[in-house]
Each structure stands twice: as C-alpha cells, then as structure tokens.
Amino acid sequence: MRTEWIKKVAVALFIFVSIWWGLYITSPPTPKSTGAPSTEFSAERAFEHVKKISPKPHMVGTAEHDSVKQYILNELEKLGVNPRIESGISTVNFRGYRAVETQNIIARLEGTDSERTIMLMAHYDSAIYAPGAADDGSGVAAILEVIRAVKAGNPLKNDLLVLFTDGEELGLMGARRFASTNPLLKEIDLILNLEARGSSGRSVMFETNAGNAKLIPLFAEATSHPVANSLTYSIYKILPNDTDFSVFKPHGIQGLNFAFIEGFLNYHTMQDIPENLSLASLQHHGENLIGNVRLFGNQNFNLAADSDLVYFNSPVGGLIYYPESWSHYLTGFTVLLFILILFVGYRHRWLTVSKVFWGFISYLGILIFSALITWYGWHLLEQYLFPKYQWIQHGETYAYQWYLWFFISLLAVITIPTFRWIKYKININNLLAGIYLTTIVLLITLTLYLPAANYLLLWPILFGLLGWILTANQLYTEKLDTRSLLILATSQFMLLFMIPFYIKFVQITLTTQLLAASMLLYLFMLGLLYPLIDYIVRGAPQRIYSMLGVLSIACFIGAALNSDFSPTQKKQNSLIYAHNLDTGKSYWLSTDHATDEWTSEFLGPNPSDSTFSGFPALEDESLLYSPAPSIDISSTQIDLVSNHINDSLRTVTLRFGHSHPANMVSITFSGDNQIQEIQLDGQSLGENTQSTDTQYLRGSELTFFRNSESSFTLQVTIPVQSSNMQVRTTYYSLSLPPSILQSYPQRASYMMPKPRGFSSGTMWIKTVSLEELIRDKGNK
C-alpha cells in the first residue's frame, strides 16, 4: 500500500513539474541592470526612456505629444543616426473621413556593406487617456536601447531603418502615410514591430506575413528566448485587429510582430504608467529585437517563400517547426493509428462499438456541459453577484486569475467523478476511445480550416494514442505497474507541456467573458490525462474531491476579496461637458449605464436617459444627461474664404478657427447636397486615402485630429443647385472646464475615464448655413 502511494505522489509530481516546465520555459527573461555590458540590451537602461516618454497621455494634438516627439529626436541625435520628421495629413475612410496631422520620426543606421534593409518600428503616440508606458513607450524605449547596444558592438553589414510612427491609435495613420508616400518603402526587406496590449507577460511573436517558410527558421536561430506559435498567426489573420505592421503586409514585406498582453486592464487606460510596466517584458522585447537585428543585419537574407510553417515552443527551448503541408499527413497518420487501436481493441474485446459510442456521447456531453457551466456561471457572477464588473469597459475583471482557478477546480469537482462513473459503466478503454474519437473529429476540423494551428491538438493526441496502445491491457484490468505508469506519463508530457500555457493565454487574449474557450482546452487536457488522474484518485476519491471543493471555494473567496476598486485597480466612468453654441444650452453627459458616487454630483440622482443627438462622437449612443452651467467659448469662427462657380459645380473654401484649446474637430455637412471633393489644407481627401468602410462618406463627415488653436481650411466642391447646406462643427478638448470643476469634487483616486471613445472632456458645437455665409460675403 505504501509503495502504491509513493507511485501516486510520483505521478502527481510528474504532472505538476511538466506543467511548470511548460510555463517556465516560455516565461520572459530576467531583466538586466544598468551595469550590463554595453553591447547587451538592458531593461533598466531602456526603462529610463519609458519614464521620460510616459509621464502623461500624449495623443496627437496635445502639448505632451510634442514633448515626446522632441525627446525621441534628441535621443536619436545623441545616438548619431540623424533623425528627421516626415509631416503630413494622413487620411482614411472609416465611417466617414478621418484625418490626422502625423509627424513620423525616421532615422537610419547605415551598414558597412548594405545589401538588405531592416526596419525597426513602434508608435510614439498614446491612446486618448493613457500615458502609454507599455503601449507603446516600451517599444520606443526598446528600439532606442537596441540602437545604442548595436552601436556599442561590431557594426552591422546591412542598413537599419528606424520608423517611429505617429497616429497609430487613431487608425494606423502614420504607418498609412509612410506606406503610401515614402519612397523608402521599396527598400525595406524585413520589419520588426513592437507593440503591447497590456503591461506585462511574455513578448510573443504573434504575427508574420504570408509565406514565412524561410523567416521562421532564421527567427528561431536569432532569438534567445522565443515565444511564438502558428496558432496566434492563424487566428490573427482572420480577426479584425490591426497594428502598424498590418499596413505593410499588402506590400508583400515580411516581418515579425511582437507584443506582450498580460496586465490587459492597464491597456489604453490611465494605469498604463511606468510603475505598472514589467521590466521582464521590456527585457524580452529587447532581446527579441537585438538578436534578430544582429542576425538579419549581417547576412544577405532572402525571405521569399510561397508556403507557411507550423511552429511552436519546444520543451528543450527554441522552436519546433515544419511545413504546414505536413499537418494533413500527420493528421492522417493519427487517424490511421486510432483506427488501428480500435481494431486491436475490438479483436481483444476491451472495446465494443456500442460502448465506444457511449464514451463519445458522454465526453461530448461533458465538453458542452462544462462550456455552459463556465459561460452562464461567469455571466451570473458578473450580472448578479458582482455588478460592479460592468464598470470595466474591457469586459474583464481585476480578479480574472482567481476566476480561472475557480472554474478549473469547480469543473474538476464535477467532471472527474463523472468520468469515474462512466468508466464503471463502460470500462476505461471504451471511455478513452470516445474521448479520442471526439478530439480527433476536432483535430480533423482544425486541420481543414486552420492547418497551421492543428499542432495544438495533434501532438498531444498522437503521443497519447501511442501511450494508450502500449498500456491498454493494463488499463482494462486496472493493474498499472511501474512500467505502464512510466509509459502513460511519458506519453502525456507534450499535453502537459503545451496545453496549460494556452489555457492561460486564451483567457488573457479573449478575456474572462470567453473563459469557456479556455475551459474547453482544460477539458481536452483532463480527457486525455484521465488514465493518470484515475490512478491518482483511485482509493481516496472523496478526500481528493473535498480538496478540490475547498480549493474552488477558496478561489471564489479570493475573487470576491479582489473585486473592489482601489487606486491600483481603478473603476472606469464617463463624464463629458457639452455646450451647443447655437442654442446656448449646456449639458453634462455620461456614456455609463448608471451614475456613480462621483458622476451623480454632476448629473443628479435622476438624469435623463436616451439617445442624445447633436454630437457626432456620441451619436447613436444611449446617454445619461442633465443641464449644466454655461461657459463662454463663443470665439469659434467659420469664415468663407472663397466661393467659385465652374459650370455646374460650386467650390467653397472655409476657414475654421478657435482660440479655446481643442484636440480634435468633427465637421459634418448636411442638407440636399452631393459632395464631389473635399480638400483639407490643400490636400484632397481622395489622395492616398485608404478605405476601411464599404460606404464612401457617411453623413459627409470629417474628423480631424490636431491642435485646433491654429486655423485650417476646408475646400468643398458641390453641385451649384445644392441648397440648405448646413456645416456643423464640433470641437473636442480632453479636459473638463476648470472654471466649472471648481464647484464640484474631483474624481476619486480609485476612478479613471473609460479608455475607449470620448468619455472625459469638453465638447462644443456650432452650426452655420453655407448659404448665409455666401450671402454675408456678397453683402460685404
């Protein structure tokens, strides 16, 4: 009996160590101090740049944005790479025209005998309310530190081009302008882009361009701590998400796109500050970058290829990779092996057709039931027990890790006894056959539609089948000796090494709203691992179930205790001051579902709740609103500069100006008009404008991001017969009016503005009739 317990402990320890190894080998490296050799990347040295770049939000159109731009220019000058500014208006058709006055920063480190050009890229603007320490101060800082380290060592053979893009947060605007107008585009052979969707975690190489068969082996060779897999590449291809690298993919340029995504609730918020940035993540960014810069910077590489590779992390470090076409052959071999096992099992009478069918139905039912438990369980918790989660716009909770462990232990309590009950009804081999049949159906489906992602199921299933066929007789008699346990454990190593990483990764990527996806992976692991679990549980099931139950309760309590908002886990809310210069009326607006202890001071206990028209950024949104005191911002000016008629077309030029600080302006033309052309400061919005929308110009609307204290002109060409054209101009400032705020309390330390959209600041609107402007001009 004592020997049996020693073997149980050994099996449990093997499972634990295998899982730990899979998480450890993909973890970011230890940050290097400022005392590291000058030729190496140091996170602490790079962090000094982060602190200078990210003290405050620095969206396009703010004074802070200009300060960050100047700091980067100064640092590049110190590095001796002669930076320059590429300025211009970048436009995109996205639910109406969007224009951004971008200022890309470009520099070049010339090689000794250049045959190829590698471009390092990150964006230096921040999201609207975020200081941007991680997104993308970490990318800018990493590139600056890499240039310093490269210059401290042996010179590169190839040229190194640096592009710090502007306006990424507003629609990849700087990258769009560079790709559409800059002749340097034709020189680029490889792009290395750095991004962040959180503030910690592994720097994952999550995207390449199509035809990566030659790129991946070189990346694996160059990178000391690679974390990459073709699952993220396959998924990212079909998602609507974009980074600056997306702009260059249609041009056929290969690239490596890196990002870390943990700490998601800091993303695009006031919490994206240097104090929350992981130095390990910054170190991983830098080591990814410098290894590839040195490898690609010293060879005449050729990345042209017509095929992709399957790739994922290896248990011994580095990457495993092979042609994507092998996925079909390996899947076919796995299916044939499974059929062979079914045949052998049927011949030896430890499998029967009817019981295999019931094993299949039972496991499928367990998968569906577990997904439903997770889906409805989470939404029950979110909506009824912890409604405070609705205040977080990310669709996530600060206690997300507690919920991961809560559902893992809860489902273990439910499914393991269920597996054991089914086993006694149909025997363990029939149950395993049903489990493998279910997972192989999923494998075939994945192979058909996402062949580069099928490795996630393929290798655990294939090794699991090999272990099963070698131990099936022992499983049937429930007499697992040391040899059988060793075979079973070894056959499950790839399952234990791979799947836990993805359970966590999928939750972080899709948020706890879709935790059911992570739990399906977890149930896949439990199913294939069941022979070992059954061996551990056998003899003391009630004790183990009790332990899992206690763990589940403890995790739930931990989640509850970590659910409150605090200065480090801020609540998100919305408050906007809106003033209509046409009517003289002012309002407090909020996009929140209800008032809270702060916004109720402005909106009152019972604000109106309806769709509030008149302000473009908030149209079609259900808003809370109440009357507000008025302030004097009557200096808005819309002047007619010229009015020309040529045949059937009228071309009018308008000048827009305002002395009150503003960061963006939205202009909407209404009436029975048909706009033929719009020019902004002399640039036609039809030139170099990329379309992301199927409609041409919704509502004839233009949103322009810039510091609007300086005036700008808009030239509009319309049919002569157009009449009743109204020009509605809405200005937006990112700060609430100080003169009014003096009478109200400040946001509490545990609050911050919602990260998406316009949720905190001042907006004012003025509408003029084009006919009246023309008439007044004529009268003068």
Image (tube, grey):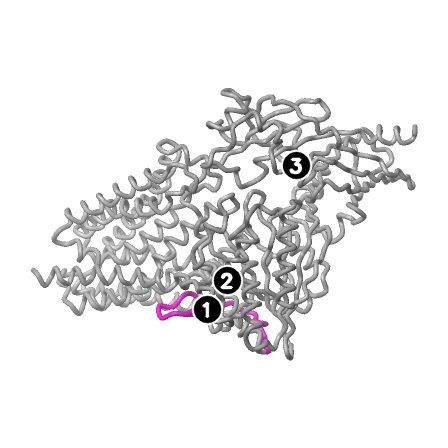
Q: Nearer the viewer, residue 324 or 321?
A: 321
SS under mark 1 = loop
Query: Which residue is tagged 1?
Result: 36
User: Which is nearer the N-term, disc 3 or disc 2?
Assistant: 2
Query: Which residue is tagged 3?
Result: 732
Query: What is the three-letter code of the residue carrying label 2?
Result: Arg
Q: CA distance from mark 2 to mark 1?
A: 9 Å
Q: Which residues are magenta?
A: 300-320
Q: Are marks 2 and 1 in contact (CB under 8 Å)?
A: yes
Query: Which residue is tagged 2?
Result: 45
- In the picture as drawn, the residue positioned furthest to the left comes out as 1
User: Which is nearer the N-term, disc 2 or disc 1?
Assistant: 1
Dot 3 crowding, Cα within 10 Å, few <14, some 14–19, many 20+: many
Task: Please provide percent x and percent y for residue 655.
Answer: 80, 39
- In the picture as drawn, the residue positioned furthest to the front comes out as 35
Q: Residue at x 68, y 58 (%)?
A: 178
Quarter location, residue 528: bottom left
Dot 2 crowding, Cα within 10 Å, few <14, some 14–19, many 20+: some
Q: CA distance from mark 1 to mark 3?
A: 46 Å
Task: Please provide percent x and percent y for residue 618.
Answer: 61, 33
